[in-house]
Amino acid sequence: MTSIILVDDDRVFLGVARSILSIKGYTVDTFSTAGEALKSAVNGDYQCGVLDISLPDMKGTELLSKIMAVNPDMIAIMLTGYSTKENAIDSLNRGAFAFLEKPVAPDVLLSVIQRGLEKQNLVLENRRLVTELTQRSRETGILLAIAQVLSQSLDFKVMMNSALAHINSYLGLEASYTYLCEKDEIVLQGYFGKKICPLPSSIHLNGNSHGKFKDLQEAHLSSDDGYRDDPLISRLLTDQSHSYVLVPLNIAREKIGILVAQAERSHAFTRDNLPFFNTLGQEMAMAIRNSQLYEEASSARALRELENLRSDLLANVSHELRTPLAVIKGYAETILQKDVTFDEGTLVDALQTIDKETDRLNQLIEDILLMSRLQSGTLSMRFKNIDINTLLRENLRRLIPNHSADRLKTYLQEPLPPVTADPVRILEVLSNLAGNAAKFSPPEADIDISTRLTPENVIVSVRDYGIGIPLEFHEKVFERFFQVYPQSQRKIQGTGLGLSICRSILDVHHGQIWVENPQGKGTVFCFSLPVLKSKE
């Protein structure tokens, strides 16, 4: 109901005007002095004021200024029995809507009041629309920013932490956190706040303990309909004096979790905020479901890859184990025959073969164990500052056992800056590369080992003059168990683990390994190690 303040020192006019306005449905307060009127105006909320210019204790225009300072949206109509141009101008300059001369006809006064209230409604509605548009524009900007964050990663933890951080920043929250449904419980899966709050890591759902959580389909203030008293939801609210919005995370009415937004002050959220939170909840629910589907697909793919790896491992290892075991068993059974006598030369050859095949078995087992430890991250490394040239010179003859070390030719750039590395593991890389070069090149061909320096790395190269590797296999040779040629076409046995081990060792050293095709015959394997930067 519209409330009007009527101020005039003519009590007869006050009574008549009050009666007329009351009949029309207005609530009217009448005062004969400016002081009384001002006191009421400060404590009241009047939509319209009808003020006499001449009052016993204050000019009406001065009273107008004081009331407008308290209530700038009030429609003010000034009355005077002594109309002057100066009074009219002064009244309008101070914010009056109209200036009427007494005696004023009731229908004229009512018409002016009606037009003034219509203007006031238009102004207030326009202001509301501008405020709402500004708020919606801000909320849209926030939603777009958060949607962009949600779309930047399918990794659940990365996506969730980033999204909650942005929600807190944009909305000025104390904390925001999510619980996701997992079988018969909800589990805390994301938290971002100014301080760590004591929240349960999970809440078991059984029987009727779902409470209002089960029926939550739209965002609600925690103060609505007894939500704070709900047994389950009350456990999600860390401080009863704070404000909360409970936002369901639903996909097609299937509840996948809940987002809780927390502000320090009470009544920080209003119902006008709920549409924004509903949209935010939908965006987050879709992002979470996409992340879950991605993880499920990744897990299924990982299981398939693991099964393929297991099959490859069994196929390769069983074959590689069977061959030396067959040789060892055959020679051992032959030597143990009581009715056969061997000369010394034959016996030595047999024992040497058994020794060689035993070494081969041992190397196979060592490679498998080493690869397993590298993949699980349990292989210990002892890093130190080393000179690659010195490491090569001191261990050159150990790089290709069972072969002539005279085949190795070194071309070392001097001097080289130190690198930080585990010398034992780098020697394993060198032994693998030199051993491969020896196996896949003619028996008398040289094997060239060279070093050189680039601005960031020391490069080590191992070249052979053998059959070479086709360009399309340059990357695949570093995959576990990969062999360039089918097993039936291979004269040289191997597990296909050596180069994969080399790459894994160099990954830990922040280095790289690759293949090059040189001019002429053969293959070049190169690997890099970062140069130890000097302290300036």
Image: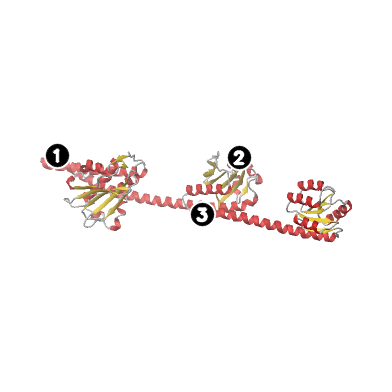
Q: CA distance from mark 2 to mark 3?
A: 31 Å
Residue 501: numbered disc: none
Decide which of 138, 219 is in the foreground and name it: 138
Q: Amino acid at mark 1?
A: Lys
Residue 328 visible somewhere in the drawing: no
Q: Position of residue 407 (x, y in %)?
A: 18, 48
Q: CA distance from mark 2 to mark 1?
A: 89 Å
The crowding category of the residue bearing disc 2, from other C-alpha atoms within 10 Å (few below 14, some 14 to 19, many at least 20), is some
- Mark 3 or mark 2, which is nearer the start of the sequence? 3
Residue 518 visible somewhere in the drawing: yes
Q: Is residue 76 above or below residue 344?
A: below
The residue pinned by badge 1 equals 338
- Mark 1 or mark 2, which is nearer the start of the sequence? 2
Residue 148: numbered disc: 3
Instruction: Tell me if 454 is positioned left or right of 347 in this view.
Output: right
- Mark 3 or mark 1, which is nearer the start of the sequence? 3
Q: CA distance from mark 1 to mark 3?
A: 81 Å
Report the quarter where the C terminus lies: top left
Q: Amino acid at mark 2?
A: Asp
The crowding category of the residue bearing disc 1, from other C-alpha atoms within 10 Å (few below 14, some 14 to 19, many at least 20), is few
Decide which of 378, 133 is in the foreground and name it: 133
Q: Position of residue 447 (x, y in %)?
A: 20, 49
Residue ranking furthest to the right? 12
Decide which of 94, 401 is in the foreground and name it: 94
The residue pinned by badge 2 equals 239
The crowding category of the residue bearing disc 3, from other C-alpha atoms within 10 Å (few below 14, some 14 to 19, many at least 20), is few
Residue ranking furthest to the front? 86
Q: Position of residue 530 (x, y in %)?
A: 33, 46
Q: Amino acid at mark 3?
A: Gln
